[in-house]
Amino acid sequence: MSQPKSNRAPVGSVQCENTTLNLLKANDFVAKAIRDRLAPHDILVLNICSSPGSGKTTLLQETGRRLKDTLKMGVLVGDPETERDAIRIREAGIDCLQIVTGGMCHIEAQMVLQGLDHFNYEGLDVLFIENVGNLVCPAAFDLGEDYRVTLISSTEGDDKPKKYPRMFLTSELMLVSKADLLPYVPFSVEAVTQDAKDINPDLEVIAISSLNGAGMNEWCKWLEQKVAEKKKAGIEA
Ligand SMILES: Nc1nc2c(ncn2[C@@H]2O[C@H](COP(=O)(O)OP(=O)(O)O)[C@@H](O)[C@H]2O)c(=O)[nH]1
Ligand SMILES: [Mg+2]
């Protein structure tokens, strides 16, 4: 899938100042350059989004532990400050580059394009981009990804999809994270799924826990299938 999804395209319909529109158009141009750069290598690119603390880094650590013998993975991780997430991800055996955004609330395509030089594309199956924790701004910035995966944790409330619709509209997969805490918090997987699907009927949903392993096999299977599809599309192209 080398073209941006139609859900991601309507930058021109964003109601904002002209300068913001120009910024988003420039971003789309760079996102295309990322797709062009990676196209010959059949690397699956996933943009992982969520609120801060929903479990993105923990999920990547656990995915690394489970799949590092079968998939070669790389991670670009964005935070306003510190290298802490990159250190955690490297400890799980995955090559990782930290993007320090200097206070910015999202990653832009230009940061990804510069970060690509860090990776050896040879044999790389998946490049994860862990976005800055934020359900608003990251939704507007195409990073050249194949799929956008948004986490919503059981501890942050099941009302978020309707409040932050663009993030769920532009995602292909919603992971309901921290499923181990569901018995203890007022959060309905059914309600959050219904709200998210009202916005985006094609959205896939998996409930996961990086702590007790619930749903992790299904997530890993989804990932492996997308990698296989990407390689198949590359062979057929
Ligand atoms: N109970 C529970 N806690 C989790 C789970 N995943 C992450 N956490 C905790 O949630 C906090 C934030 O996780 P982190 O991965 O740093 O979130 P990020 O900011 O989205 O990258 C940490 O204290 C994790 O240990 C989970 O599946 N279950
Ligand atoms: Mg993190």
Image (spheres, grey):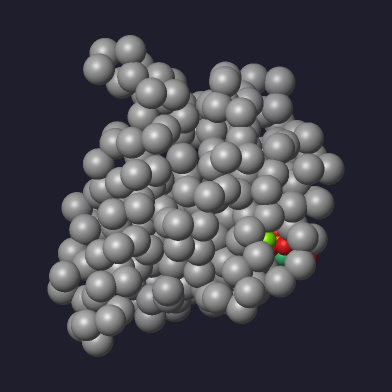
Q: Quadrant of residue 232?
A: top left
- Which image quarter is the N terminus in? top left
Q: Quadrant of residue 35?
A: top left
- Specify whether 215 is left or right of 6: right
Q: Can residue 50 be seen in this view?
A: no
- Specify whether 118 is left or right of 225: right
Q: Return the residue nearer the eye: 8 or 154.
A: 8
The residue located at (53%, 75%) in the rendering is 105
Residue 125 is situated, as x and y percent measured from the top left of the image, at 54, 26
Residue 18 is situated, as x and y percent measured from the top left of the image, at 22, 82
The residue located at (38%, 80%) in the rendering is 163
The residue located at (60%, 69%) in the rendering is 101
- Which image quarter is the C terminus in? top left
Q: Can residue 134 be seen in this view?
A: yes
- Specify whether 181 is left or right of 107: right
Residue 102 is situated, as x and y percent measured from the top left of the image, at 63, 74
Residue 198 is situated, as x and y percent measured from the top left of the image, at 26, 65
- Residue lying furthest top: 235
- Specify whether 205 is left or right of 82: left
- Residue lying furthest left: 13
The residue located at (78%, 43%) in the rendering is 90
